[in-house]
Image: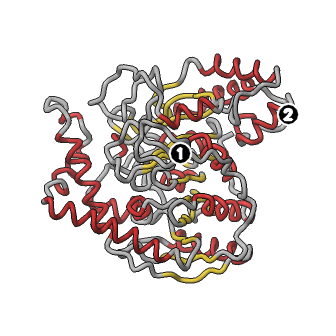
Amino acid sequence: MPDIDPALLSAEDMLAAFARRQLTPVDVLQAITERVARLNPGLNAFAVMNPGALQEAGESTSRWRSGRPIGPLDGVPCTVKDLVDVAGFPTRRGSRTTSSDPVPDDAPMVMGLKAAGAVILGKTTTTEFGWKSPGDCPLHGITRNPWNPAYTTGGSSSGAGAAGAAGFGPLHIGTDAGGSVRIPAAWCGLVGLKPTYGRIPQWPASAFASVSCAGPMTRTVRDTALMFGAMARWDLRDPFCLPDDPRDWRDGIEAGVAGLTVGVLNNPGFDAPVDADGIAAVERAAQLLIDAGAYVEQADAGLPDTSTGFGRVWGAALARLVAGTPSQLVGLLEPGIREVADTLGGMSAIEFMDAEAIRAAAGHAMARLHQRYDLVRCPTVPGGPPLADAPTVDPVRSLWTAWAPWTFTFNLTRQPAITVPMGPRADGLPNSVQIAAAQFRDDLVLRAARAIELAQPFAVADLG
């Protein structure tokens, strides 16, 4: 593949090149490492690089030469968000309050990727404890969008978004408690999957354990499915994860959407804002799905006010985080965390239980909606990304006006939801659309995303 930068290949194309002996995992890693050295100083995607990556790539190269790859990702580079444990590295969570000591064990999803042969390139930046959507944190500073570094990547999987768009390998782990996979994927022109709750084991638990999932962030839908298969494996350490389903999630992904019913969700339980670019993306996606044989119509889920429900879950989690931080370190936390904790964290037990009732009602409403519709479609984000250097102002209001009004509902309902690129916005930054399905039907969101990808191939950021 002499005319293609190996760093920009999809995981599937890398694996095919390894099998044909056109490239080795060392060739690919060297191309990516050169790209990181050239571009990352202006983007700040990494919390730490893995000094053992070259050795891992060399061992993979030897296996491919012997015709004995150990798994479906052997030799493919992958990054891990710094909310997720990688043995031998600290998990700093973007915070100056955390320990710099290395952790002893891999998180389940990291074990799955390593067992499949993936090469861990490094750990990517995150907002502090994954609390917000703008992509900066006190420990590592500002992470910038490869499409235009003046803008944020989004968060909290900020480094994963930057790394994916910049061509720092094809596979990136993000986590998502209210949109933290899908928002940076949307603003960086990537595919981002928040799977069914419990599909990917969570250990150790995050600050937002009751709504948080991990998910793949990639440049193609098929790579998302490939990576998902390695991450979504049962693990004893998470008693809430689903039984093992060791399928290849690419199976059936080309089946298309002919005959499927798609509801257009215009209201996630409150008056969620969306700009003209977002509306145009939803309408364009509708036409692509209709052209592919789906039935598309407006849908009303009858949802409760999910902004109230999620706000209380978010506020309680951050209040608990602040309360559990040693008093001498609380001042090191980002002021916005303390602001949310002070504003939303003083709820009564009845108010918190009311939030749980809202979550259950939202789940029931969406389940009823899926009796009629196989899929629902809506915006991913209310608008384009804010400036990377902009301060975080009024985070309580920003949550449902500027950051996550279209994403957090699916965390409450625990459904799978995926964001896919939909060409450029008026300002040249990426546009997107979000697709959700009933719980456990992760296969359907992958099929629909693949149908859109085939009808409108996604662009890659041109960074040279």
Numbered circle sitting on residue 219 = none
Q: Is 438 situated left or right of 219 in this image?
A: left
Q: Earlier in the sequence, mark 2 or mark 1?
A: 2
Q: Quadrant of residue 53?
A: top right
Q: Which residue is mark 1?
A: 161
- Mark 1 is surrounded, within 10 Å at the Cα level, by few (under 14), some (14 to 19) or many (20 or more) other residues, namely many
Q: Which residue is mark 2?
A: 2
Where residue 205 appears, as percent x and y from the top left, is 36, 40
Where residue 448 appears, as percent x and y from the top left, is 65, 65
Nearer-the-camera pick, 4 or 317? 317
Q: Residue at x 65, y 80 (%)?
A: 295
Q: Residue at x 47, y 23 (%)?
A: 87
Nearer-the-camera pick, 384 or 413? 413
The quadrant of the picture occupied by the N terminus is top right
Secondary structure beneath label 1: helix
Where residue 378 appears, as percent x and y from the top left, is 52, 70
Q: How far is the residue under mark 2 from the one under mark 1? A: 27 Å
Q: Residue at x 54, y 52 (%)?
A: 185
Q: Quadrant of residue 373?
A: bottom right
Nearer-the-camera pick, 365 or 156? 365
Q: Residue at x 51, y 35 (%)?
A: 80
Would you say the residues marked 2 and 1 are in contact, meaning their CB atoms lie under 8 Å apart? no
Residue type at mark 1 is Gly
